[in-house]
Image: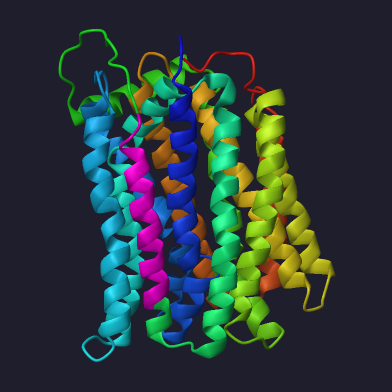
Amino acid sequence: MTYNKKNYWLHLIEGGFIMGAVHFVSSQTVLPNLLKQLDCPDIYISLMPVALFLGFLIPPIFTAHLLENRKLELPIIKYTTIIQRLPYLWTGLILIYGDNYFSNQMIAIVVLTCPFISGLFGGVTLPAWQHLLKKTVDQKRISSMLAFRFIMSCGIGLFAGWVVNNLMKESTGLQIYGWLHLIAFVFMVLSYVLFILLEEKESKPAPQAKRKLSQTFKRIPELLKEEKLLKTYIVQIFLKNVPFFILPFMAIYFKDVYKKNDSYMGLLLSAQMSGSILGNFTAAYFGDKFGPRFNLLLSTGSFVIMCVTILFIDNEFCGIICFFLSGITIFVSSVGNTAMSLFLSSQKFPSTFYALISLCNAISFLFFAIASSWFWNGTGSFNTMILLSLITGLITIFFTLKLPSGYKKSYV
């Protein structure tokens, strides 16, 4: 199968723009601090880092039956991705102009639901996008393309960290957060302009009867039986999201312990983006050379080191080091798991496979977010949370080693 090289670069650059956009309103540094200022319940803060992921990952299980055996994926994705970008526009405007019209609680809900709603409309066609990726990018270059788009997004994230740091030295009002949302929206518009330039060849799916939603759920036991590695992969997927057990409160913890002001969020964001760039260069090279399992091990190993650092290093640079390591953890994990999903995907029911993986991810994210809020309120000990995370990280490595390297088998 031949691939249009232009599609490789369009996927890379448009993905870099849209993922870079959200760093201006980082759900792990900037927005938890905003929610704390709004004096909202801790559960809002714990859900903030996973809101976008939950939005993306819940819909596919309900839409997979509508997306299988399509000749073209692009037409439907073009429409849903327009709506996907709009929440950042209205959230920015509400933060700038709505202070006199809405309570802090209402504004907090708008901020929390912004990435969730955006994710919902992206997630509706997520299986179609994953299939589009398989159709338009050479399987041998998928790891490098994913890694380099993350690297581009992290370069934008470094700029975002500088912007956040400088803006918050001048003011910490809601308007600043509103302008950050509007900047994110501009980058998302640039992403969309590039996305619609992709070229997709019409495929010839095997004729099948129209499938109902109930059939998606009926296919899951069949998938689990036929795909021998799927159960192990599901366990690995559930455990690998453990960083989101501590990330919701990590920036707040370091800010309070070392008595920093709000501009410190910009430094933490820059540290995280620096780690992401380093990790993704590594992911691009070793992912193409050794397969996605290497990247999964790299990301979890980085997380384990981060946990040990928090437990044994007690100075103001600890926060910078840990967010640097968190950048490696999160972004290399994204590269590894996307590539591993493509590697393991069912040839018979690809959309159902992706939908099941998305659902398992969503359950995992929700579990760790709720557990994070419960432990933060219940124990008051961040070190206890770190110790539990460290143990979970070691178990994750064990299950990752049971997966194949993901290098030799064709993606298509």
Q: Which image quadrant is residue 290 in? A: top right
Answer yes or no: is residue 209 visible. Answer: yes
Overall secondary structure of the magenta section? helix
Image-based side of 213 in relation to 282, left or right: left
Image point 57% across, 80% down: which residue? 166
Farthest bottom residue in view = 100
Does the stretch in magenta take in 37? no
Q: How is the image coloured?
A: rainbow
Q: Quadrant of the N terminus?
A: top left
Given residues 224 and 256, the one toward you in this image is 256
Query: Where residue 90 appears, x then y in whole percent?
Result: 26, 69
Answer yes or no: is residue 26 visible. Answer: no
Given residues 145 and 253, the one toward you in this image is 145
Image point 40% across, 63% down: which residue? 184
Look at the picture and state if 380 lies above or below 18.
below
Query: Where residue 402 appears, x then y in whole percent?
Result: 67, 27
Image point 53% across, 20% down: which residue? 139
Image point 45% across, 50% down: which residue? 17
Look at the picture and state if 84 lies above or below 77.
below
Q: Which image quadrant is residue 156 in? A: bottom right
Image-based side of 254 in relation to 20, left or right: right
Q: Which image quadrant is residue 285 in? A: top right
Query: Where residue 91 appears, x then y in whole percent?
Result: 30, 71
First to last magenta residue range = 178-198
Given residues 228 and 317, the one toward you in this image is 317
Image-based side of 190 in relation to 284, left or right: left
